[in-house]
Image (spheres, helix red, strand yellow):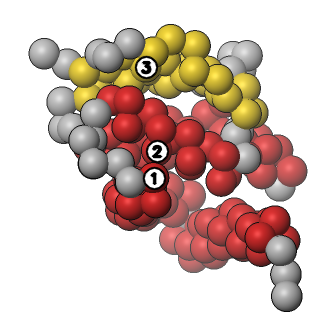
Amino acid sequence: MFDDRIIADYLRRSYLSVDGLWFVKVEEQHGFDEALQLDAEVWRILAKIQARKACELLDLKTRTLADLAASLALKFAAEQYEYQVVNQTPDKVEIEITACPWLELLHKSGRSHLAAQVAAAICPTDFIAWAKEFDKGIAVSLPERMCNGEHGCRLVLKVSG
């Protein structure tokens, strides 16, 4: 009855909306700091669920760094990030993110002033949880972030050891 694009757009919008709505409601009742702490806890768990589902959907069996990069490509496409892999070796993947749907929502809602604080708590939590589903030895860093006023976000995934 409906094509997949319409269904995907509807679900994506609902996904983005529910994240913001529950955060604002917790913030109203318990303050920003507690809302941010709970948000990080939610993203830590949700990232595990998403990473596992991505592995299943993409039939990723080896859980290598390349598999992690492939699973994140699904996440980025589903959430409508703009990004490119700028460097990929067997031990390191660097991804440059040039548009982030979450940052765009903060701008649209007039909450840009909170972006750096939210990103510092949520982005590392999300990406570290994804990486741990592949290999607990994968180090995650975000040396550049749009929320800090930089041109883009640089996500670095590196096999340590």
Nearer to us of marks 2 and 1 is: 1
Mark 2: give few (<14), some (14-19) or many (20+) Cα within 10 Å.
many
Residue underneath mark 2: 71
The amino acid marked with disc number 2 is Ser
The three-letter amino acid code for the residue at tag 3 is: Val
Pointer 2 with pointer 1, Cβ within 8 A: yes
In the image, residue 69 lies at what x, y percent? 45, 33
Q: Amino acid at mark 1?
A: Leu
The count of marks equals 3
Point out the frontmost of discs 1 and 3.
1
List x then y, in percent, for residue 25.
Answer: 63, 75
Please state if 84 lies on the left or on the right of 125 as rendered: right
**C-alpha separation, residue under disc 2 versus residue under disc 1:** 7 Å
- State the CA–CA distance, disc 1 to disc 3: 19 Å
Residue 93 got which mark? 3
Residue behind mark 1: 58
Q: Are marks 3 and 2 in contact (CB under 8 Å)?
A: no
Dot 3 falls on a residue whose secondary structure is: strand
Rendered location of residue 133, percent (x, y): 27, 48
Looking at this view, name the residue that lies furthest to the left. Answer: 161
Q: Earlier in the sequence, mark 2 or mark 1?
A: 1
Whichever of callouts 3 and 2 sits on the residue coming sooner in the sequence is 2
**In front of the other: 69 or 13:** 69
**Where 35 sits versus 51, above or below?**
below
